[in-house]
Amino acid sequence: MEIVAVRGAISVATDSDERSAMVGAIENLLRSLVKENNISPERIVSIQFTQTSDLIHMNAAAALRIAFPDYSAVPLFCSQEPEIIGMLPRTVRVLITWYGEGPSIPVYLGDAAVLRPDLQDHS
């Protein structure tokens, strides 16, 4: 086994309940990354999140703890994205590092898919 890392991102829906929207988005993103990359919680070294400054009601790491209680031993970290003119709003990015086999498969969901057009199916 080697240390492998994968990136991903998701847009968080505009919702009257941003907390629920954040938990749902993080659950969707993590499930997709775990499935695509065959990741199990006990092999994860750490998960790092960034979120845009317009997401103010919940930290993405806290949302993961709600969505996946079995990840309680996984070290998590979340920080705010730097504000860049023209940046994609309401976006959470993630970097997962784990012991496994590469190559990794990135996952970009919702409006965040525009961040990696090279991953889109062009058939």
Image: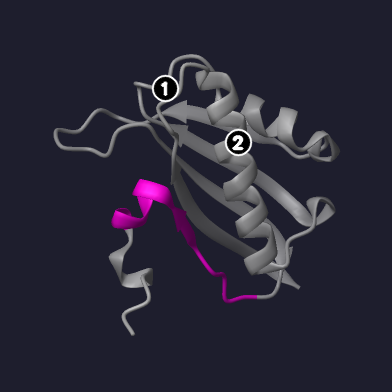
Q: Which residue is mark 2?
A: 24
Seen at 62% across and 65% down, the residue is 4
Q: Is residue 60 visible?
A: no
Residue 8 as seen in the image, left or right of residue 88: right
Depth check, front residue: 113 or 7? 113
Instruction: Pinpoint residue 84: horizontal percent, then vertical percent.
Output: 20, 33
Q: Which residue is mark 1?
A: 55
Q: Image height check: is 116 above or below 47?
A: below
Nearest to N terminus: mark 2 or mark 1: 2
Depth check, front residue: 58 or 79? 58
- Label 2: few (<14), some (14–19) or many (≥20) C-alpha neighbours in 10 Å: some
| Residue at the farthest front position | 16
Q: Image height check: is 9 above or below 55?
A: below
Seen at 45% across and 23% down, the residue is 15
Residue 65 as seen in the image, left or right of residue 85: right
Q: What segment is highlighted magenta in the picture?
A: 102-115
Residue 21 as seen in the image, left or right of residue 100: left
Closer to the observer: label 2 or label 1? Answer: 2
| Residue at the farthest bottom position | 123
